[in-house]
Image (spheres, rainbow, N blue to C red):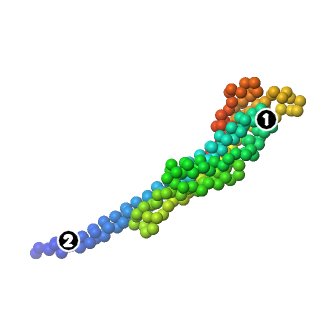
């Protein structure tokens, strides 16, 4: 007696189609998640870079203030604390965000800190998840400026031509009013980093 195998062959095909369809759906879902993660990463990169750019611009302005007031050491602490007036550097954050194809809202959090909220200009794109074609990513970052230097003002009976020794993270700068050719750079005076 012969078995008819043709009747079993038709039953495997619908199972095969269901499994392949399920795998295809999973692949498309993972692709949508990947697109969303990539867009979010773009927004975070724009926020980080923009916040750092604004803080670096302010650091440079503070360093310029220090150079202009170098022979007046009583003003140094105000400069290192960010108490001296400097222009907002949010324009720098916006400039860098444009390069990263994002728009930003920039806030000065105290004299030595910038917070930036970035939104990507691009969207997640068309995926199997409805609504992603219009979905932008938003991320924020905060950059902080910290003084790296300390000093001790000379006593009242000290010579007016003596400037304090500047200690910047273990490096000493002996400043001579008559020879100001070897001075700390902005990165020696201030540290700029993203807040944790």
Splitting the image into 4 quarters, where does residue 169 fall?
top right
Instruction: Say which label, 2 or 1, has the lower sequence index.
Output: 2
Give the residue at x 42% y 67%: 129
Q: What residue did someone put label 1 on?
A: 73
- Vertical arrangement, residue 150 with respect to residue 18, above or below: above
Give the residue at x 72% y 30%: 172
Percent x, y for residue 157?
A: 89, 30
Most foreground residue, 196 or 85? 85
Percent x, y for residue 110?
A: 71, 52
Report whether residue 96 is seen: yes
Most foreground residue, 17 or 33? 33
Q: Residues within 10 Å of mark 2 (few under 14, many from 20)?
A: few
Q: Secondary structure at mark 2?
A: helix
The answer to whether residue 93 is left or right of residue 129 is right
Splitting the image into 4 quarters, where does residue 145 fall?
top right
The answer to whether residue 118 is left or right of residue 175 is left
Give the residue at x 73% y 24%: 179
Give the residue at x 49% y 53%: 101
The answer to whether residue 176 is left or right of residue 57 is right
Residue 32: image tag: none
- Vertical arrangement, residue 77 with respect to residue 28, above or below: above
Q: What residue did someone put label 2 on?
A: 9
Percent x, y for residue 18?
A: 31, 70
- Number of callouts in the render? 2
């Amino acid at each position: 007696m012969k078995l008819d195998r043709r009747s079993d062959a038709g039953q495997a095909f619908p199972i095969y189609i269901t499994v392949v369809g399920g795998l295809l759906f999973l692949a498309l879902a993972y692709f949508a998640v990947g697109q969303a993660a990539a867009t979010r990463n773009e927004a975070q990169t724009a926020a980080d870079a923009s916040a750092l750019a604004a803080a670096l611009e302010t650091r440079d302005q503070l360093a310029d203030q220090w150079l202009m007031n170098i022979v007046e050491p009583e003003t140094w602490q105000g400069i290192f604390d960010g108490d001296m007036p400097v222009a907002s550097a949010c324009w720098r954050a916006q400039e860098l965000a444009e390069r990263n194809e994002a728009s930003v809202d920039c806030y000065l959090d105290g004299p030595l800190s910038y917070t930036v909220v970035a939104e990507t200009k691009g969207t997640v794109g068309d995926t199997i998840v409805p609504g992603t074609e219009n979905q932008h990513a938003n991320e924020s970052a905060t950059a902080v400026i910290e003084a790296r230097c300390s000093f001790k003002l000379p006593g009242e009976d000290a010579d007016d031509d003596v400037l304090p020794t500047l200690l910047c993270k273990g490096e000493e700068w002996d400043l001579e009013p008559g020879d100001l050719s070897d001075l700390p750079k902005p990165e020696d005076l201030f540290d700029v980093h993203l807040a944790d």
